[in-house]
Amino acid sequence: MPSQSSVQELQQPTSVKDALALQQRDYDCTSCRVMGSVVFTGMGIYSYASGMRQLREREREILRSGSRFGLGARKGAIYALSASLVGLGVYRLQN
């Protein structure tokens, strides 16, 4: 049979601040942060390297195609994607 004090404690509502602190304590370990950060940063570096390599290989095709998205727009998209992924890696490490 439970003691009277534990029943009274269970009937008291837990403050949100205490509940969030308890949840945050076990939420994210350092190795999880480092692994996530390395993965995001690696994806950013890889997408930049492979994207630029593919653009160099297909530069003539792109210029001959007359597409409204030339090399500048494609390079900008690769820069934006890569920078976003590296930024997520840094954010993951800090938060």
Image (cartoon, helix red, strand yellow):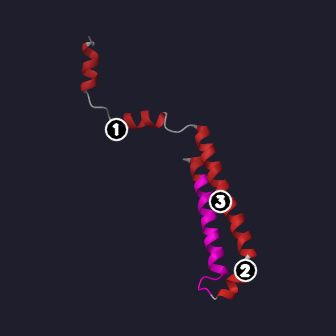
The structure residue drawn at horizontal position 63% and vertical position 44%, both measured from the top left corner, is 35
Circle on res. 44: 3
Vertical relation: 92 (above or below) 82: above
Q: Nearer the viewer, residue 19 or 1?
A: 1
Vertical relation: 58 (above or below) 23: below
Instruction: Give residue 43's position: percent from left, percent from top.
Output: 65, 57
Instruction: Give residue 3's position: percent from left, percent from top.
Output: 27, 12
Nearer to us: label 2 or label 1: 2
Circle on res. 42: none
The residue type indicated by label 1 comes to Val
What is the distance, in whole Å, between disc 3 and disc 2 at their CAs? 22 Å
The structure residue drawn at horizontal position 63% and vertical position 76%, both measured from the top left corner, is 74
Q: Earlier in the sequence, mark 3 or mark 1?
A: 1
Q: Nearer the viewer, residue 21 or 41?
A: 41
Circle on res. 16: 1
Give the magenta-colored segment's residue range: 67-90
Left or right position of 47 against 15: right
Neighbour tally class for label 1: few under 14, some 14-19, many 20 plus, Cα within 10 Å: few
